[in-house]
Amino acid sequence: MSERIPIKDVTPVKVHQPEPSKHENAYTPRSRIYVRAVEGTLETFRRFFGLFFLGIFALIPWIQYNSNQAVLFDIGAQRFNIFGLTLWPQDLTLLAWILIISAFALFFVTTFAGRVWCGFMCPQTTWTFIYIWFEEKIEGARNKRIKLDQRKMDFDKFWRKSLKHFAWVTVALLTALTFVGYFTPINQLFIDFFTFDVSFWAGFSVIFFTVCTYGNAGWMREIMCTHICPYARFQSAMFDKDTFTVAYDPSRGEKRGPRSRKTSHEEIKQKGIGDCIDCNLCVQVCPTGIDIRNGLQYECINCGACVDACNGVMEKMNYPKGLISFTSEHELAGGKTKIFRPKLIGYAVVLFIMTSLLTYEIIARVPLEVDIIRDRNSLFRETNDGLIENVYTLKVLNKSQTEHTYKIDIVGLEGNKYIGPDQVTVAGGEVLNLPISIAIDPYALNETVTEFQFKVTSIDGNSDPVEMSETSKFIYR
């Protein structure tokens, strides 16, 4: 064998670690990351984007529809109300479709734009930045927070720390109450919780999610992204060389180093110096404490904070922006990004098909369910008139949120005598258990087991007629 195996240089890159804490009592297993505030286009967009969905999250439980809470996932009653749609355990396939669509939407977005979910929509990121905002407003900017933590406890430090944690707990408590309000009537929940009259499970859930929010956004922060969340681990399977992600352009930035602001861009190019002035602002604004200049790292959540920080520096230095930007590997190599590529198109096609199937299933869904339960005590009995009688329990489930009247008919059993009400009214979201009997002359039966149908039809005229049939058996001998 004369062919030589090509060898690729995989020299490891030194990964930036946050500066060690200078606490005298350093008890934490990690160095604390002091995130520096940043202003810019992406930061402004991320804030409004996060606040928009945060507002939707906080507002939805308070919306009323038909005098009821519009969105209520009532686990105890085993029904989910979503405006005019009521879902039951029998509608589990709808949940499966929603989860499949969510997964493929995540794959599609990640393939196209990297981990923008993590940086712009993930609740962990949103609440972490909210907590950091309170921290900055109460304790001061990054350098002030570092000095505050280094000095011994005094009154100024005590009241600032106390106020910060009070704000954190308040946000966590409101978050927990809002979240639990999706599963129990939110109006009564707030009243019962603050009057100490809440049920055990509702109260336990509020306290549990308060502690989780406070711990995750206040203390764990980047640990959730780098060690607990599995998404960062399998993201590389969705990336390709055309995926847009936050990246540093080493061909333009190296060799990095400080220089006078008076030095023009042309002069530094003549000296062989790159555009990066090594100010480390991209590291200081990163919520996970990485150095984006070391290349793509699984800790990066694509929040774009380093992009805004670097663009601000470039603007002050009168250099072109974009040293750090949302770009692709092909663009960094001097090529052109291919937007329409097989993998992305494949995800889009599957996403479209799944969404269409879910839409069809919701449109074709019949808001009525009928179930037949035969009497288990006896298969049949003979009446005083010599008729053969079978006993059933008819269960009528009104899956809508409005009251309906239904007519009951027997189809496929000629000469039967129906014993019981043939019209029933069922409230919205309720189940009616109706015991009935069917009797027939034995000479009209040709077989020992005869199949027939219960036909239930809405007759109130409030909407289009809804019809449902259920097959059962009439047994003799």
Image: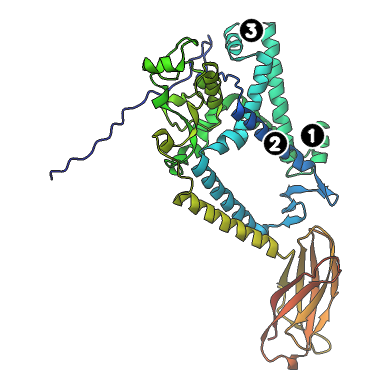
Amino acid type, label 2: Phe
Position of residue 227 relative to residue 437, above or below, is above
Q: Quadrant of the C terminus?
A: bottom right
The residue under label 3 is 153
Q: Residue at x 36, y 17 (%)?
A: 272
> Relative to the observer, which residue lies in front, 465 or 336?
336
Q: Furthest-left residue in view?
A: 2
> Relative to the observer, which residue lies in front, 59 or 168?
59
Look at the numbered disc 1 and give the secondary structure of its residue.
helix
Q: Residue at x 62, y 32 (%)?
A: 46
Q: Residue at x 38, y 23 (%)?
A: 14
Using the rendered view, name the quadrant where residue 251 is placed. Answer: top left
Residue 52, numbered circle:
2
- Mark 1 burial class by Cα count in 10 Å: few <14, some 14-19, many 20+: some
3D distance between C-alphas at marks 2 and 3? 38 Å
Using the rendered view, name the quadrant where residue 376 is placed. Answer: bottom right
Amino acid type, label 1: Phe
- Mark 2 burial class by Cα count in 10 Å: few <14, some 14-19, many 20+: few
Amino acid type, label 3: Met
Give coordinates of residue 281: x percent, y percent: 52, 18
Q: Quadrant of the N terminus?
A: top left
Task: Specify which label sits upstream in the sequence, 1 or 2.
Answer: 2
Tell us which disc is closer to us: 3 or 1: 3
Q: Is residue 132 left or right of residue 347?
A: right
3D distance between C-alphas at marks 1 and 2? 27 Å
Look at the numbered disc 3 and give the secondary structure of its residue.
loop
Tell us which disc is closer to us: 2 or 3: 2
Task: Specify which label sits upstream in the sequence, 2 or 3.
Answer: 2
